[in-house]
Amino acid sequence: MSDGTDSGAHSGNAIEGAGLHKAYGGVLALEDATFCAAPGEVHALVGENGAGKSTMIKALAGVLRPDDGRVLIEGEEVRLRSPEEALRRGVATVFQELTLLPRMTVAENLLMGHEPRGTLGLIRRRWLPAAAADLLAKHEVSSVDPGELVENLPLAQQQLVEIVRAATREPTVLILDEPTSALSKREVDWLFGLVRRLRDDGACVVFTSHRWSEVTDLADRITVFRNGTESARTSS
């Protein structure tokens, strides 16, 4: 249980939800729920379906506004209106439901908003595949064709693209919501290597999974949610 000492500005948290409440009609999804994660750690958030962990993730990612309570990034209270606003504050999220645009290429999805441009500021479309290939190679992904339409990729490859896109934004906080559900063992090993590199570079990684072996293998700390609030916290 939280001892009430976590308070963004004083604890050095990278991200925090403090005393959050969220109800959907008569269903209480979060009740005075608190979660915080620090720079340079992988912090797993786990719990059964309906425990409130997905609602907490969405509040931290800017998908929904809590009815009460505070969200803090690096100790500063924020009122996030969208995942895009969260990203501008350094919080990138890979959601369980992928957000890639299926009728665009891998390159277009990876570089959206960061396209290579010429001297007049015009997008150099012919440079997109090479620039995307460089990003994929940087993150040691060789199985994805940057010129392929996303809708033609297997689900696992789409997940890889989504993860690489988030990592290339160099977030201070990376939230991964059930990221391994479609991945093979080799791809999970790749993801864990990426997460550990980000952690070692000082990023905060928040990780949710139903696979307890993955949680204990990857996480530095584990917070368990039950009935819409934190029920336990431990070091892995």
Image (tube, rainbow, N blue to C red):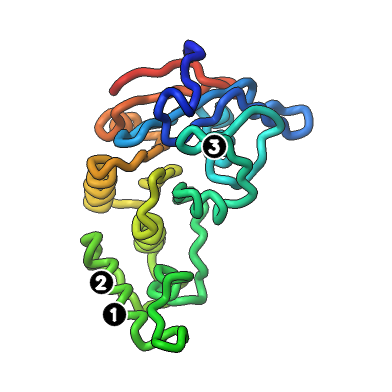
The x, y position of residue 78, in whole percent, is 59, 40
Identify which residue is drawn at 22% across, 67% down.
Answer: 137
Q: Residues within 10 Å of mark 1 (few under 14, many from 20)?
A: few
Q: Is residue 126 above or below residue 48?
A: below
Classify mark 3: helix, strand or loop: helix
Relative horizontal placement of residue 63, taking residue 207 as reference (left or right): right
**Front label number (2 vs 3):** 2
Alpha carbons under labels 3 and 1: distance apart: 36 Å
> Amino acid type of disc 1?
Ala
Classify mark 1: helix, strand or loop: helix
Identify which residue is drawn at 69% across, 29% down.
Answer: 68
Q: Would residue 173 be visible to someone looking at this image?
A: yes
The residue labelled by disc 2 is 134
Q: Name the outermost residue toward the right.
A: 25
Residue nearer the viewer, 159 or 17: 17
Q: Are marks 2 and 1 in contact (CB under 8 Å)?
A: yes
Q: Is residue 65 above or below residue 48?
A: below
Q: Are marks 3 and 1 in contact (CB under 8 Å)?
A: no
Identify which residue is drawn at 45% across, 36% down.
Answer: 74
**Front label number (3 vs 1):** 1
The x, y position of residue 180, in whole percent, is 36, 46
The residue labelled by disc 1 is 130
Q: Is residue 182 above or below residue 158?
A: above
Residue nearer the viewer, 157 or 12: 12
> Amino acid type of disc 3?
Ser
Q: Are marks 2 and 3 in contact (CB under 8 Å)?
A: no
Between discs 3 and 1, the one toward the N terminus: 3
Q: Is residue 82 above or below residue 72?
A: below
> Amino acid type of disc 2?
Asp
The residue labelled by disc 3 is 54
Quarter of the picture holding the C terminus: top left
